[in-house]
Every structure is written in C-alpha cells, then in structure tokens.
C-alpha cells in the first residue's frame, strides 16, 4: 500500500506548500484584497499538473491484476469483434456503450499492447477530473485529497467506462452554471455512450438552480419517496432489467448493501452546509448549485439502499463534494476556523481512504507496477 500513502501524504505536503504561499501572499497584500480565497494561478497550475502526472503514472503503469474489474477490460480489448471494421463495431455495439467500444477499437488500430490501453483510459478521465478541480476549486490540493477519500483510485482503476463518463459530466458542470441546457445535454449524451447510467445526471441541470426554501424541501422529499417506492422489491427487478440490458447478468442486483456509511457522510456534509446557509450559500450561486447536487446525492444514496445500481449513480454526484467543501472552507473569514475546517476535512477523508484500502473491495491492494509481474 506504500504507493497509495505516497499519493496521500504528497497531497498533504503540497497542501502545506500552498498554505505557506497563501500566508505570505495575504501578509504582503492589502487587507481588502481577495488573495486569501483566490490563490496564485501559477502555483495552482503547478500543483494540478504535478498531481495529474503522478496519478496518471500510478494508474497507467499498474499491473493488470490491480483492480477487480480490470480483467473484463482485458477481454474487451482483445475481443475479436473489436478487430473488425468500424462498421462491424458500430453494428455489434450500437446499443450499449458505443463510445467506449469505439475508443477501444481506435486504440487497437495502433497497438495490441494492453498497457497502452490502460494509459489511454487513465489519461482521459484523470485529465477531466483534474481540469474540473483546477477550474472550480479554491483549495485544489484539498479537492484532490477529498477525491482520494471518496474513491477516485477505485473508480479509475476499475470502472473505466464510468470513470470516463463521470469526467465528461464534470466537464458539463460549466454548462449548468451558465444555464446552457443544450451543451449540458450533449455532455450527458456523450457520457451515456461510455456508460448508460449517465442518463441519471440530467436532473442535475434542473435541481441545481433550486433555492433553499420549504417548497423545494418538499420537492426533494417527494422525489425521495417516489424513487424509494419505484426501486422497492415490487418494481426494482423491472427497473434493473430496463437499465442494464446489454450488461453481463448479475453485474447489478436488487437490494444494495453497505451504503449506510456513505449516507452518513453525505448527510453530515448536508447539515454542515446548512450551518453556513446565510453567510455562504445564499451569497454565492455556485456554492448553492453544488449544495443542491449534494442533496441529490443524499436522495440517490437513500435509493441505493434498495437498489445497488444506484450506488453507481451516486458517484456522479459525490464528486461535487470535492469542490463544495473546499469552497465553503475558503469562504470562512476567520483564519482559525478555516484551519480547523481543513484539519477536520483532512482527518475525516484520511479515515475514509485508509478504510477503503483496508476493506479493499475494489481489489487494488497490493499495488504492483506492470514490470514487477
């Protein structure tokens, strides 16, 4: 697990580095400047590039036994159907995840080296994730740290198709902010060509603009009730059959387990946001947008307790925590409260990260490089 702790602690070290730079920047600038909540673009860019490179290296050069789901992608890459013509691939896979199969077919035209395939499927999602952190986070190292805690490595090492789909959805966040429905829907449809569950991201656009009031709280409650009823044992099997046609039997099942921890996490963060609703949420539209997406994550996590496939859908929403929490902390005026907020966040997501490594449900422990096999 050494390599994972390198990622964790190097993030903290660069966090300390950024904090020192920001401290002297604030010290050497007038009190009215906004430098304390908007760190230097140069060092923010350096941190983003360094960590993108580090994460890409760790992901792309892992051996093909790091990740419980990676064996399936090995079979996809060497599938005889994907050595066919472009028309043959389109004909065989037009019903499901055609974007992924076209990408696999394209890579296969240049090489039959599976490691290069792993490199490509690491670079694409990680680039989209880190670009999102760079553009949207006020404390980028903390965003990376939170992403580690909520399963970035598990996702990029295992669910390659959905990791790319999630990256595309995060790219589409800019169109939610600018209220450009057409471009956001284009992002969703592109993401769906990599994983069909991306269709459940369409509600993001519509709930993002909700204000914090009683009427919208009732809407969320009704939505939760409707989804929980619709995914009960009575209807769940029908919904699963509809949603996962084209996937391997048994890949998803009715009756999700183990979602209570994530539900507690999301609910706690939801209440944290309410503590700052007057000073933070009501005064910043972007923070209110991400708060609504966190509420949707709670709703979907509730549903996942009935239907395990929704745990996949929740992941599209939980990555907004990686910008919501840092941007909330950066808006706090009291320096000591900000430091306390960062300390609590680091401690909490460190525990999540280490617990995920200990449980190793994704089969990423032990880590080995491909040349060690």
Image: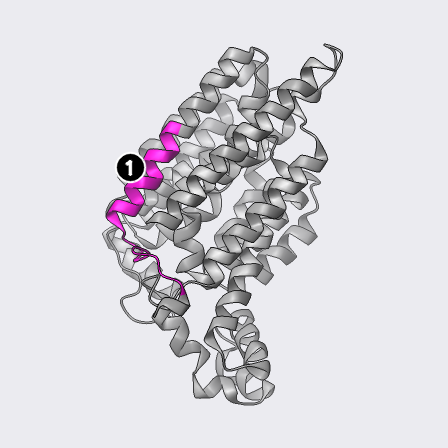
In percent of width and height, residue 291 lies at 52, 31
User: Position of 77 compared to 307: left or right?
Assistant: right
In percent of width and height, residue 364 lies at 33, 56
Q: Which residue is mark 1?
A: 261
Q: Residue at x 47, y 71 (%)?
A: 115
Outermost residue, front side? 372
Q: Residue at x 52, y 22 (%)?
A: 213
Q: Residue at x 52, y 51 (%)?
A: 54
User: Position of 319 compared to 172: left or right?
Assistant: left
Q: Which residues are magenta?
A: 347-369
Q: Residue at x 30, y 51 (%)?
A: 307
| Residue 333 visible in the shown view | yes
Classify residue 32 by image quadrant.
Answer: top right
| Residue 150 visible in the shown view | no
Question: Is residue 231 or residue 104 the one in the foreground?
Answer: 104
As for residue 77 lying within the magenta part, the answer is: no
In percent of width and height, residue 240 lies at 33, 61
Question: Is residue 108 or residue 316 the one in the foreground?
Answer: 108
In the displayed structure, would residue 123 be above or below residue 149?
A: below
As for residue 362 lying within the magenta part, the answer is: yes
């Amino acid at each position: 697990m050494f390599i994972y702790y390198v990622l964790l602690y190097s993030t903290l070290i660069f966090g300390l580095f950024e904090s020192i730079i920001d401290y002297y920047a604030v010290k050497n600038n007038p009190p009215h400047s906004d430098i304390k909540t908007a760190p230097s673009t140069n060092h923010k860019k350096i941190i983003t590039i360094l960590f993108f490179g580090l994460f890409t290296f760790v992901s792309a050069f892992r051996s093909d036994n790091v990740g419980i789901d990676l064996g399936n992608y090995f079979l996809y890459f060497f599938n005889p159907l994907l050595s066919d013509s472009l028309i043959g691939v389109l004909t065989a896979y037009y019903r499901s995840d055609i974007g992924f199969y076209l990408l696999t077919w394209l890579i296969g035209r240049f090489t039959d080296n599976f490691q290069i395939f792993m490199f490509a499927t690491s670079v694409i999602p990680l680039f989209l994730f880190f670009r999102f952190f760079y553009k949207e986070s006020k404390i980028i190292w903390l965003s990376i740290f939170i992403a580690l805690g909520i399963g970035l490595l598990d996702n990029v090492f295992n669910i390659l198709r959905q990791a790319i789909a999630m990256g595309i959805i995060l790219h589409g966040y800019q169109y939610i902010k600018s209220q450009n429905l057409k471009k956001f829907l284009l992002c969703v449809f592109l993401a769906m060509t990599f994983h069909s569950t991306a269709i459940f991201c369409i509600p993001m656009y519509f709930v993002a603009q909700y204000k914090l009031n009683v009427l919208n709280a009732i809407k969320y409650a009704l939505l939760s009730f409707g989804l929980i009823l619709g995914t009960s044992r009575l209807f769940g099997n029908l919904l699963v059959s509809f949603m996962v046609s084209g996937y391997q039997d048994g890949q998803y099942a009715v009756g999700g387990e183990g979602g209570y921890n994530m539900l507690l996490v999301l609910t706690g963060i939801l209440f944290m946001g309410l503590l700052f609703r007057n000073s933070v949420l009501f005064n910043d539209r972007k923070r209110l947008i991400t708060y609504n997406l966190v509420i949707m994550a709670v709703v979907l996590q509730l549903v996942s307790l009935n239907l395990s496939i929704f745990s996949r859908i929740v992941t599209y929403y939980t990555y907004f925590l990686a910008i919501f929490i840092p941007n909330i902390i950066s808006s706090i005026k009291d320096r000591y409260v900000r430091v306390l907020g960062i300390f609590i966040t680091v401690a909490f997501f460190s525990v999540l990260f280490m617990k995920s490594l200990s449980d190793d449900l994704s089969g990423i422990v032990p880590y080995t490089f491909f040349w060690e096999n």
